[in-house]
Amino acid sequence: MTVDTGNNGILDFEDDIDLIELREGLTFSPLAIINGEDNTISIIVASSGEIISTITRADEIAIASDDFIEGFKKNKI
């Protein structure tokens, strides 16, 4: 995930199994995790309010910094 690319949807996230990739330049620290209605979790850039991802079917999932991998570079083709 990265900023300015829209809301990336994540289905069937499995805690302690799946990881969320943060592109180079984005870290966990400026993010806010918001539990929504209907078993959704939104990942938001706190300073701008931009929603960068929504996890659906997220009942009983605790999203924390250890669910993210930071520093991935986008491959150019």
Image (cartoon, helix red, strand yellow):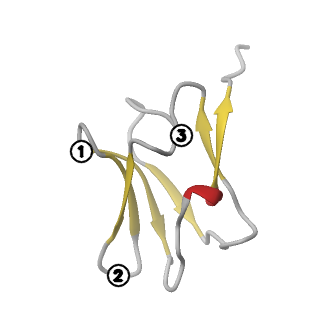
Please tell me which residue is depicted at 68% across the width and 24% down the height of the picture: 73
Sequence order check: which comes first, mark 2 or mark 3?
Answer: 3
Residue 63 or residue 50, whichever sits in front:
63
Task: State which quarter of the image contains the C terminus.
Answer: top right
> Does residue 37 appear to the left or right of 31 in the view shown?
left
Q: Which residue is mark 1?
A: 49
Residue 50, quarter of the rendered image: top left
Closest to the observer: 13 or 32?
32
Residue 28, compared with residue 2, is above or below; it is below
Q: Which residue is mark 3?
A: 1
The residue tagged 2 is 38
Select label 2 or label 3 by which is in front. 3
Q: Residue 60 bears which disc, if any?
A: none
Badge 1 marks a residue whose secondary structure is loop
- Name which residue lies at 66% across and 73% down: 15
Horizontally, residue 58 falls left or right of residue 68, namely left
Mark 2 → mark 3, Cα distance in angstroms: 23 Å
Left or right of 12? Residue 4 is left
